[in-house]
Amino acid sequence: MQDVNALITFSSRSGSTEKLALAAALGAVQARANIRLRWLRENVDDETVDRVPGWRENRERMTREYIAPREIDFLWADVLMLGMPARDGVSSPELKTYLDGLKVLQSAGRLSGKVGTAFTAPELASLCSVLAGLDLIVVPPGPTAAGNAIHSARLHGRRVTERARELQAGRTAESKSTR
Amino acid sequence: MIVIRRSAERGHADRGWIDSYYTFSFAGYQDPAHMGFRALRVINDDRIAPGRGFGAHAHRDMEILTYVLDGGLTHRDSMGESHTFGADTIQAMSAGTGVIHSEFNASAQEAGHFLQIWIEPAIADAEPSYQQISFDPREKRGRFRLLAAPHGSNHGGAVTIHQDALVYAAVLGSGENLGQSLAPGRHAWVQVARGNVSMNGEALAEGDGAAVSGEQDLSFTGGPGGSEFLLFDLA
């Protein structure tokens, strides 16, 4: 079986999108992907953070547990999975940081053939078209099982990994047949 | 036959926040001659700086045991388990179909010293599980305290793993003797966690390991300053 490398990137404050990211990553692991989990640092002042109960604690913990995605993570990945809190707009600074990182690689032709998806995000359809515009092969999430976002994220992580493996197998077969 | 794996011969990586000695091949240390022993695949002797640790990462199809020698460890995982534990505790995680977890030195002031042990499971795709059992340190004083036993065996007080392996801890004072018999055909690995101990006349120091095959009677004597060691009884 071919290796699939899955990079799961998320933005989270209260930790609920983090839970979905862990679920999507777990689905990828269940489908035998190698995974990296990355957290998009937020640029928010301490005063704002302290107005929301629990935010500072979560931020300190996530700062300890995750690094931000690096260029080598994007290059390593066969699959790019993204999770953004629904309350954030598509113009959120965290999302912009992520997409800017990808744009640099896309213009160098380094994203072609990689699979992209979001397991939760605002304006999902428009985000998927942005990912497609970055030369990613987009696998949109299926319908969310009612009341069970965690379960849906896990299934999606699994399904996307399986799709990526099929694509890899297809490419291998194609390169053999044209040889 | 007893084959000794000396402490200083182990793989070593000091990355600042973590100083690790690898009894068997692990991460950047790869030696085909030291890929494990029987089902025992990894013994990592890790010293981790205050507040530092391993961020979220995945495991699959592995029985992972953690034994704290000094300090404490905070564990969080995708099964929803979140615990801090210290010495005289055995923690076991059956990764099975997949687990994502993080582990950090629980102290912001003190370095921690941990043994991380991987045992290959006899079955693939097991249901992931988490177990943690604490015991009175007197239970390992001058005798073997069973830490881990195979699933389905009827040993109370030990974590269970998906492999035909028994793991014990023992603490011996200087000059104190302790014996253990292995069933015919069984193998053993001895790992010295601290101090000095001799086994069947072979002197072992902290960090030393020994592979035992074709022997039935193991006889341990605490060396100067005494010792704590682990014994793996393996198929």
Image (cartoon, coloured by chain):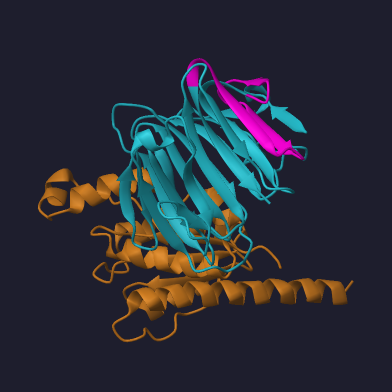
> Chain letter for cyan?
B
Give left or right: position of A67 versus A62: right
Q: State the quadrant of the C terminus of chain A.
A: bottom right
Q: Along the line of sight, which residue is nearer the eye, A77 or A31?
A: A31
- What is the x, y in percent for residue A126? 39, 77
- What is the x, y in percent for residue A68? 41, 49
Q: Quadrant of residue B117?
A: top right
Q: Residue at x 67, y 75 (%)?
A: A167
Q: Residue at x 19, y 53 (%)?
A: A55
Which residues are drawn in magenta? B199-226
Whether residue B219 appears in magenta in the rendering, the answer is yes
- What is the x, y in percent for residue B231? 57, 38
Q: Along the line of sight, which residue is nearer the eye, B68 or A21?
A: B68
Per the rendering, the colour in which chain A appears is orange
Give left or right: position of B175 versus A119: right
Q: Residue at x 29, y 47 (%)?
A: A61
Q: State the quadrant of the N terminus of chain A.
A: bottom right
- What is the x, y in percent for residue A142? 44, 84
